[in-house]
Image (cartoon, rainbow, N blue to C red):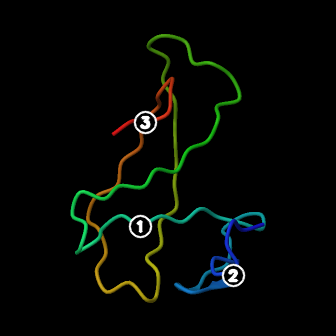
Amino acid sequence: MSCSSRAGVPINRFGEEAALEGEAYGGLVLFSRSKWRYREYLSAKMKRELAPNEWVCISVWLSAAETAGIVADGFGVTCLRDAPSR
């Protein structure tokens, strides 16, 4: 289920993309010409708390929108105890 009628799966205002697995995916804007400090965050709750110095493997599948005029050349992942702040 989408939080917006304009952001459905597989067809939405940004193009068409089937989910890699399941029935949904998350989308975010990584670059904006008019708002160069703009940031979006995608978050998920961990199933359990991590132990200090524990190694984890996180994988993501990235796909640029068909309507993207520019794509970002950087993407990062981090594990935080609390939500990110500005």
Please, what is the three-letter code of the amino acid marked with disc 1?
Val
Residue at 67 percent across and 72 percent down: it is: 4
Please, what is the three-letter code of the amino acid marked with disc 2?
Pro
Residue at 47 percent across and 73 percent down: it is: 63
Residue at 48 percent across and 24 percent down: it is: 55
Count neighbours of disc 1 (C-alpha within 10 A) and say few if under 14, some if 14 to 19, many if 20 or more: some
Above or below, 73 against 37 in this view is: below
Q: Closer to the N terminus: mark 3 or mark 1?
A: 1
Of 78 and 12, the residue lying toward us:
12
Q: Which residue is mark 2?
A: 10
Above or below, 48 against 16 in this view is: above
Residue at 29 percent across and 71 percent down: it is: 32
> 29 left or right of 13?
left
Discs 3, 1 touching: Cβ within 8 Å: no
Above or below, 22 against 55 in this view is: below
| Tag 3 secondary structure | loop
2 vs 3, front mark:
3
Count neighbours of disc 2 (C-alpha within 10 A) and say few if under 14, some if 14 to 19, many if 20 or more: few
Count of marks, rendered view: 3
Q: Which residue is mark 3?
A: 84
Count neighbours of disc 3 (C-alpha within 10 A) and say few if under 14, some if 14 to 19, many if 20 or more: few
Q: Is the C terminus in the top left, top right, bottom left or bottom right quadrant?
A: top left
Disc 3 from disc 1: Cα separation: 16 Å
| Tag 2 secondary structure | loop
Q: Quadrant of residue 34 in the image? A: bottom left
Residue found farthest to the top: 52
Q: Which residue is mark 1?
A: 29
Q: Closer to the N terminus: mark 2 or mark 3?
A: 2
Residue 38 position in % (x across, y down) = 30, 59
Residue 20 position in % (x across, y down) = 66, 68
Q: Is the N terminus in the top left, top right, bottom left or bottom right quadrant?
A: bottom right
| Tag 1 secondary structure | loop
